[in-house]
Amino acid sequence: MTTTSAAVPIAAEPRPTGRWRAFRERESVTGLLFVSPFIVGFILFSAIPMLASLVLSLTDFDPREPDEIHFIGLTNYQQMLSDPVLHESLGVTLRFALLVVPLTLAAALGVAMLVNSRLLAGRHVFRTLFYMPMQIPLVASTIVWIGVLHATTGWLNYALEGVGLPGPNWLQSTFWVGPALGLMGLWGIGNMMLIFLAGLQSVPTELYDAAKVDGAGPWASFRHVTLPMISPVLFYNLVIALIAAFQYFTQAYVVSNGRGDPDRATLFFNLNLYREAFGFFHMGYASALAWLLFVIVLGLTVVLFKTAGSWVFAGGER
Amino acid sequence: MTAVARPIGRPPAAAGPLHRRMRRFAVMSAVTLVAATIVSAFLMPLGYMVATAFKDPSQLTAIDAPLYPAAPEVFEYQGKELKVYDVPQPDGSIKAWALLQPHREDAIFIDPANPEAGEITWIGRPRTLTQHWGFSLKVDNFTTAWETIDFPRLFLNTFGIAGLSTLGAVLSGICVAYGFSRFRFPGRNGLFILMLATIILPFQVTLIPSYAVYLALGWVGTWWPLIIPHFFANAYNVFLLRQYFLTIPRELDEAAMIDGAGPFRILRSVIVPQAVPAIIAVTLFHFFWAWNEYFLPLVYLQGKPDLQPLAVGLARFNALYEQQPTLIQAAAIMAMALPVVLFFLAQRAFMRGVVFGGVEK
Amino acid sequence: MNDTQRLGQRPGMRVPILLAAVALIGAACGGGGTAAPSATATPSPTEAASATPCTPVEIEWFVGLGTGENEEQIPQEEAVVEAFNDSQDCIDLLLTVVDNTEAADTLATRIAADDAPDIIGPIGIRALQSFGDQLLDLGPYIESSGIDLSQIEPGLVEAYNVNGKQIGIPMAVYPSFIYYNKSLFAEAGVAEPPHEVGEQYEGEDWTWAAVRELALKLTVDTNGNDATSADFDPANIDVYGLDAQFTEHDARAWATIFGGSGSAVADDGTTAQWPDNWREGLQFMYDGIWTDHIIPDETAVDALAAGNTFQSGRIAMDVVHQWYTCCVYPGEGDPAVTDWDIAVLPVGPDGTITSKLHADTIGILDSTEFPDQAFEALSFLSQSPELVTTWGAMPAIESQRDAFFAALDERFAPLDIDWNVSTLMLAYPDNPSHEAYMPNFQEADSANKDLGSKIWNTPDLDLDAAIDAHIELLQEIFDSAN
């Protein structure tokens, strides 16, 4: 495989066709035209709320008393430095991201390969089954998991006891609640699986044949054909999983009575932010928190994009 | 090129066709068995959900109840329903008697085989006895859920909102992703990052300003805030489609170009057919996201129950029956039935799309 | 921080100010033009009602901060709204029902976006701490309309007088008492608890110590050993003697139930404290969970009818409010509790009975454009007994109570519940309320719940040290309230 090096900055010389040259000249305009729905939508629907939240982060805005708003400069940002709850919530979120991002990526890719395999009978059914949890509203599926994970009456602990393992108190233990949420996260791999599947199905079969001719075994053909060819969707899943992990909220809210129980072990960044915004009505401070998260996640995303050049295959990029 | 699938891991050509088929059958059985095991473990919570949905609430907290839906075996005695227990007798045998009145160290039973004999006092601890349970499906949970939740209207609303927003999201997503993946223009990378930025900022802090914007537009209390923005591309979809478009070799565009195709025709006749799996993935992805979207419909459609989608109606039901997991699970199962069927059908199309894409290559 | 610049003064100007601020920032950063012109239009103010005596105005009633958001309650509320709309032509009353969990968020969002409803409620005393400052002083309106408050206990009226403003007319009250499962008493062979104040139990004064003794006998494991036995197995408990369900982790609520009235704020209004009777109360609860095993911990509670513990049939005595008639029934399904009654609360460590009281009212947001019309609607609502009935509350107006109990009797027949207990307990409300004001209320309240969560989940807690740390934390929170 020689085409795996990527992020090709324009390779070929322009073809000497008149039409091609004309196209090149109008490329910027055409490109912007195609992208314009986003630009218009951004201006209409996103720009104002985003900038407003930035402005609010410089105020003591209480949504109940919109008339009592004051500019307080960078006070909110200063306050973040000495907010132990914020530091705790960052830790909780980082640890969770480190656990759940690789875990779900690996599981989703594994499942996608399984349900893409021609050696599997009834692939349609299996795909539907693996995707099924995605069709349960998140709050409802979290309620199901709370039942399954219950220390004494949950099916998971019944199963563990069945094989002679002591089942922990998943949701009330500060240690086990993280792995418990990780398990719950596995239930949400449906979309990732689907996207991997789309990627796997776009790998031309002749590449595998070629690899076979070169004497590649299954691992080598996975490593040198599959991975590079699906690297664009892998990259997508990685970025989206990262963003999702940092914005983790609903499940934490439902599991922890909305308060980060037990003992703040599930006080994720966004749960803390939500509490500040709507629990304590510190919308100004919450906006500052949001922009902190924004900077962190955008920074990580940009770093990922920078590294993408070295591992993400992009046959069609220019 | 051929569209016919060629299996990976073919046995050596020397093996005979019969032997080959046998071996293939064995491998397929093994793989399918492993997959079935994994999927059963994966869907165990779903089993819990179904079992719960068919139970009577009292079974959930009864300490010795079986895991499957069951009802206590009862014996009717003087207008009262008495529960039946296995009662050890002095001679070592066990009799199924109906419990009339338990005490700490003794209990009064009725023998269902011989009720005329009247009350039997048994010495022992009734709390240690095993109760009789019989398999029993409580279908009432589903009827209650159906009667309480206006499923047809909610399904229709959800279809309307999810369908329209998916239409907009997919069309605009294809268009914008094409722009980002095939054209160079000043500020392209910056714009792309800006687009990702819109999904990175937590919605909790943009909620109030967004609400103010939609209020100013007069859209609060309508479907528009849930639909119109998706016609202007959203980052999740654009990003995915862009990633996929990047894998489509440029030579195909250029060949079409030489044939005199303009950018729109290239998009239509080269890019889109090649990207059918991704487009279907995005469609499903967005549709089910919109299907389950809860908070924004709640905020923008509060006080408009006639316009609300399923997720909001379901949440209200859940709040109402918070202490009755049996009803909640029954409602959730009913709510997911339709999307599951849709998905099953859609992913068959997904497969056809792949084959179709293969022909075009 | 106090000399900072005021941004907006008048309601109605918020959206433009917000947008203008954004546009300014945008222009300053060289990104001018990002503010969409189409979005700057203000919602046009509804036409003034002064033109004719009767240009119908819309008044929106927002339900969900307390009770009233349940599916079976909505038709009743709709009927009252319709009755009001039929009774006059000048006001068009609209009903908005929001789920309890999101009600505070959505209300705050709408107030912030200058899209606030006019009437909110039913709200309890706790919700007042969140939105009390935004409520209109009804005093002048009550006076000019001549509404008669004499039928309502003065203490209740007083409960809704916040900072000199009468922000609500009490509509519904919910005293608390002991619901007990008669079958479990028969099984244990013990006498039922007292129904009269001052009545003894088995020759002893009815105190929490007596309740504990009784609960030990009622608590039983799966081997049939009760909690007084040396063989009792706390890992396999079948029936718990005591619970105080639906208290939502609130340590103040538990302290009040088991310890009596108190306040987390000293008289100076700024010093954090935890009165001794509250320490005793929490100690009682903590020992009940972790030493005596007569009270379920949170893990056990989750498995007992998903938190509706009494309904599981595995709780012998449960301290809950009058509103719990919502959720206990012989009725649908195959109920585990078929025979129950109510009993009076015991004398607490402070030497008196305390029946933690909940109350509901409806109020008017002071941002309303039409306070007169809103008050007209509010007075109609506050005098509709069917609303109170549908909320499962005892009417604050004394003359309506007999009808209320008669309706309950009909519902729970053939059981003969001794509702007199409820009336008796109304004379012993917690004062100050367990939901009373604390500086920086939401954070302090959340800290109280963190303490409650610790008590509920930690088997080897040094409770005194935890309370000491909690007082310190509360002080920090109070101090940050400017």
Image (spheres, coloured by chain):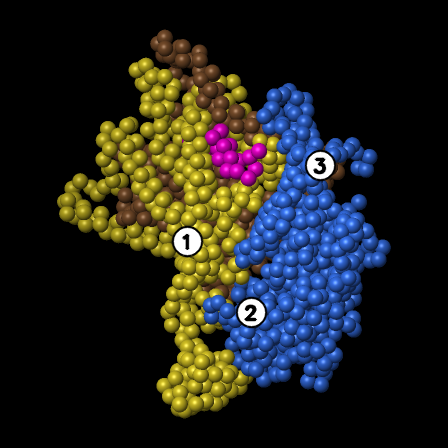
Residue B334 marker: 1
User: Which colour denotes chain B?
Assistant: yellow
Residue A275 marker: none
Q: Residue at position x 38%, y 72% from top?
A: B134
| Residue C167 percent coordinates (x, y) | 74, 51
Query: Are the residues flagged by discs 2 and 3 in contact, CB closer than 8 Å?
Result: no
| Residue A269 percent coordinates (x, y) | 61, 44
Count neighbours of disc 2 (C-alpha within 10 A) and say few if under 14, some if 14 to 19, many if 20 or more. Answer: some
Res A318 → quadrant:
top left
Say what amino acid the circle numbered 1 marks: Met
Is C306 left, or right, of A126 in this rendering? right
User: Rounded to the nearest whole Å, what is the CA distance between mark 2 and mark 1?
Assistant: 31 Å
Residue C50 marker: 3
- Dots 2 and 3 on the same chain: yes
Residue C446 visible, this angle: no
Say what amino acid the circle numbered 2 marks: Arg
Helix, strand or loop under label 2: helix
Image quarter (top left, top right, bottom left or bottom right) of the N terminus of chain C? top right
| Residue B166 percent coordinates (x, y) | 43, 36
Q: Residue at position x 40%, y 42% from top?
A: A193
Helix, strand or loop under label 3: loop
Helix, strand or loop under label 1: helix
Circle nearer the N terminus (2, 3): 3
Residue closest to the far right: C268
The chain painted brown is A
User: Rounded to the nearest whole Å, what is the CA distance between mark 2 and mark 3?
Assistant: 48 Å
- Dots 2 and 1 on the same chain: no
Q: Nearer the viewer, residue B303 or A69?
A: B303
The chain painted blue is C
